Image: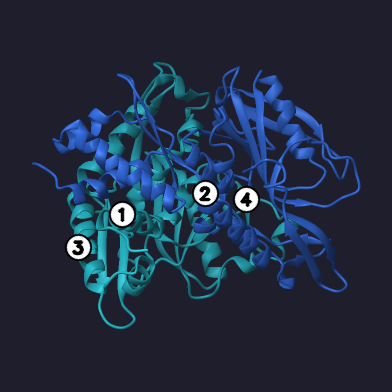
Chain colours: A blue, B cyan
Amino acid sequence: MKWKRSERLVDMTHHLLEHPHKLIPLTYFADLYDSAKSSISEDLGIIKETFEEKGIGLLATVPGAAGGVKYIPKLQEPEIRNIMQELINELSHSDRLLPGGYLYMTDVLGNPDMMNRIGKVFATAFAHQKIDVIMTVATKGIPIAHAIARHLNVPVVIVRRDSKVTEGSTVSINYVSGSSRRIQTMVLSKRSMKSGQRVLITDDFMKVGGTMNGMKNLLEEFECTLAGVAVLVEAEHKDEQLVEKYLSLVKLREVSEKERKIELQEGNYFSNGGF
Amino acid sequence: MKWKRSERLVDMTHHLLEHPHKLIPLTYFADLYDSAKSSISEDLGIIKETFEEKGIGLLATVPGAAGGVKYIPKLQEPEIRNIMQELINELSHSDRLLPGGYLYMTDVLGNPDMMNRIGKVFATAFAHQKIDVIMTVATKGIPIAHAIARHLNVPVVIVRRDSKVTEGSTVSINYVSGSSRRIQTMVLSKRSMKSGQRVLITDDFMKVGGTMNGMKNLLEEFECTLAGVAVLVEAEHKDEQLVEKYLSLVKLREVSEKERKIELQEGNYFSNGGF
C-alpha cells in the first residue's frame, strides 16, 4: 500500500519520537511506506524544520551507506527556564516542610509528566556527549534516571544499600555520607556495567555530595569514567563540596522551620554549561 | 504566523503523544496555529486514521463546548505478542540463573525502551478503566510503575520497607511474605493517596503474591480501591495464590539449577482479559 505524505509525516514523527538517539536508515522508511528515498528525504526536511521551530529537538542526518537520520531530544532555553520556575513554585509551598528542615518532594518524583520533562532537560545538556549508562541510587533517584535514560537511549543501573539475591554477585564499597559523616555501604551488581563505560550519575537531592561521591568511587571499581552529574535539587551548605562539577535544576537556599519558609532559586544548570 | 498542514501534523502528533489520556480542546490547536477549527478537525482525522492503522493508539473525540481530543495509547495484539516473545527469549538465557533458582532481570528493568513498551502493554489493558494512582514497592517495580503511569497520565506512589524522614508521616502495615512466611513491613507516606482513589498495583515479579497482597492491605488503610494488578513475570508454584485477578506478561514455568534450564511461557495477559 502506498502512503500519502500526510500519513507518512504522522507515522514518521511517532517513530522518531519513540526512538531518540537511534540512527534510522532512510531505507527503513522507504521500504515501510513503499516510497522513493527522495520523498522520504523531503518528509524528513519538513519534520526537521518543525522539530527545530517548535523546540522539540534536532534531526541529525548522517550521510553515506551506513547513514540515516537520528532524533536528538533538545529543549530550548525558555522551556527549560519554565520547567525550573514550575519546580520552584511547586516546591516552595510551606506544607512541604518536614521536621529537621527536610523537603517533601515524593509527589513531584511520582509525577510522570514532570519526570518526562526533567528527563528531557538533562538529556538536552548531555545530548552531544558520549553517555553509555545512567547510574543512580535507590529509591528516589530512579524515576529521574529512567526519564533521562529514555531520552538518551541508554540503560539505567541502580545502586542499592543492601545486597539482594536477585542481583547475583555484587561489588560493594563503603563511603562517608556527606553531612552525617556516617559510614555507609553501596552495592552494585557485577553484571551491570562493563569497564570503560562513560557514566552519568543522577539523584533527586544533593547537599555536600557524599552519595554522589560514593557512586563516583563505585565507578572506579568498575573501571568506568564519570561523564557527568545531574541533580534535581541541590542544597546550600557551608561544608566542602565533594563533587566538583554537576548540573542542578533548583537550589534550596534556606529553610526556616520556625517561620515555615522555603527559599528556592534556579540551580546552576545554565551557569555550569547545561545549555 | 500561519502553519502549513504538514507542519501542523508533525507538531500535533508530537503534542498528542506527549500528553496521553489528556483532553485537549480543539481551540488550543486552532489558536496555536492560527487556523480554523475545521482545518484542525481535518488534521486530527488524518492523525486518528494513521494512529489506528499503525497500532499507535486511539484518538477519542469528545464533542461539545468542554470537548476536545484525547490520545489513548493502545497497542494491537500482534505487537503485544511480539513484546512477550522478546521477553521470553531474553529471559530464558541460562546465564540469568542465580543461586536458589532466582532469575537475573535487573538489566531488563534498566532498559528504558523495553520499559516503555511494557508500560504501553499494561496501559492498553487499563486504557478504558478509571485509574487514579499506580502503586509499587521499592525497588524493582519502580521503572514498570513509571512506564505505565506515563502512558496513563497518573501519578506513581512507592511503598517502602522502611520509614524515611523525607516521607513525612507514614502509614505502616505488617504482612506475611508469600513463600518465606516471614513477617514484613510496608510503609507509605500519608500524603501519597486520598481516600476513594482507584489504584493499579504493579511489580516485576510475583510468586504466591504476598507482596501484592500486602499492598492490597495497605490500600484499605487509605480507603482506596484495587483497580488491577499488573506483573511482569509470574512464577509457577504449588501454594495457594493470594491475589485472585492479575495480568502477567511472562510465566516462569520451571527453573532447573542442575540442568541450567529456564522454562518460560506467555503470561495470562490475553487469557485474563488484558486485551
Q: Mark 1 points at which residue?
A: B7
Q: Which of marks 1 and 4 is in front?
A: 1
Residue at 74% from the left image edge and 61% from the top image edge: A103
Q: Mark 2 falls within which chain?
A: A
Q: Which of marks 4 and 2 is in front?
A: 2
Find residue A119 and report its horizontal and vertical position in percent: 54, 47
Q: Residues within 10 Å of mark 1 (few under 14, many from 20)?
A: many
Q: Where is residue B136 in the image (x, y as percent from the top left)?
A: 52, 53
The residues bearing labels 4 and 2 have C-alpha atoms spaced at a distance of 44 Å
Reading the image, the residue beneath label 2 is: A75
Labels 4 & 2 near each other (Cβ < 8 A): no
Task: Give the answer, above or below, for where B37 lies relative to A183.
Answer: below
C-alpha gap between disc 2 and disc 3 = 29 Å
Q: Residue furthest bottom?
A: B65
Under mark 2, the amino acid is Leu
Please identify the quadrant where the N terminus of chain B is shown.
bottom left
Q: What element carries label 3?
A: helix
**Foreground label between 2 and 1:** 1
| Label 3 packing within 10 angstroms: few (<14), some (14-19), many (20+) | few
Farthest residue toward the left? A1
Amino acid type of the residue tagged 4 in the rendering: Gln
Residue B249, horizontal then vertical, whole percent: 33, 43
Instruction: Check if mark 1's residue and mark 4's residue have beta carbons within 8 Å.
Output: no
User: Which quadrant holds residue A223?
Assistant: top right
Residue highlighted by disc 4: B184
Question: Can you say whether B106 is above or below B166 in the image?
Answer: above
Mark with earlier residue (1, 4): 1
Alpha carbons under labels 1 and 4: distance apart: 55 Å
A66 to B88, vertically: above or below? above
> Residue under mark 4: which chain is it in?
B
Depth check, front residue: A19 or A76: A76
